[in-house]
Image (spheres, grey):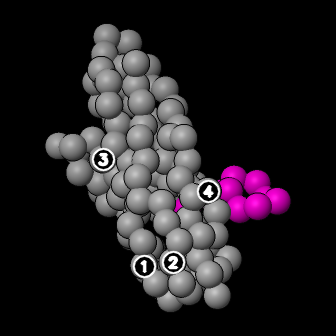
Amino acid sequence: QVQLVESGRGLVQAGGSLRLSCAASGSFFSINVMGWYRRAPGKQRELVATIIRDGSTNYADFVQDRFTISRDDAKNTVYLQMNSLKPEDTAVYYCNAKIVLVGTGIEYGYWGQGTQVTVSS
């Protein structure tokens, strides 16, 4: 059974920084895409950033060079370094991974439980 476990939740002041981590555990063949999404109060979940196996990244426009996504395949972990945080970044952040299970050749999508990030003004 595959699980994604997030860490790094916190309360920071505007302009501050926070680093989120998400580790995948269980039995699987490979992790193709890892990413972060967020859901702000009263809004739908939206993409923050993704990173694929070759290191290519994709960011939402609102990131504006403030966030950096990275991955450590030896640890099956994806990170989100968030700098220059704004109150509008307040949201529950979710880790997502597209994982190929052993012996199946099929890619499945998995979600973490979510971690709260609160930015005060």
Tag 4: residue type? Val
Main SS of residues in magenta:
loop
Of labels 4 and 3, earlier in sequence is 3
Q: 115 above or below 90?
A: above
Q: Which residue is mark 1?
A: 17
Q: Which residue is mark 3?
A: 77
Q: Give the label, 4 or 3, closer to the camera.
A: 4
Which residue corresponds to the image point at 49% horizontal and 66% vertical from the top-left? Answer: 10
Distance between the Cα atoms at labels 4 and 3? Answer: 19 Å
Tag 2: residue type? Val
The residue stretch that appears in magenta: 39-48
What crowding class fits label 1: few (fewer than 14 Cα within 10 Å), some (14-19), or many (20 or more)? some
Q: Is residue 76 magenta?
A: no
Q: Are marks 2 and 1 in contact (CB under 8 Å)?
A: yes
Of labels 3 and 1, earlier in sequence is 1
Q: 79 above or below 84?
A: above
What crowding class fits label 4: few (fewer than 14 Cα within 10 Å), some (14-19), or many (20 or more)? some
Q: Secondary structure at mark 4?
A: strand
Q: Which residue is mark 4?
A: 92
Q: Which mark is residue 12?
A: 2
Distance between the Cα atoms at labels 3 and 1? Answer: 19 Å
Horizontal and vertical percent position of residue 2? 40, 25
Placement of the C terminus among the 4 image quadrants: bottom right
Of labels 4 and 1, earlier in sequence is 1
Of labels 2 and 1, earlier in sequence is 2
Q: Secondary structure at mark 2?
A: strand
What crowding class fits label 2: few (fewer than 14 Cα within 10 Å), some (14-19), or many (20 or more)? some
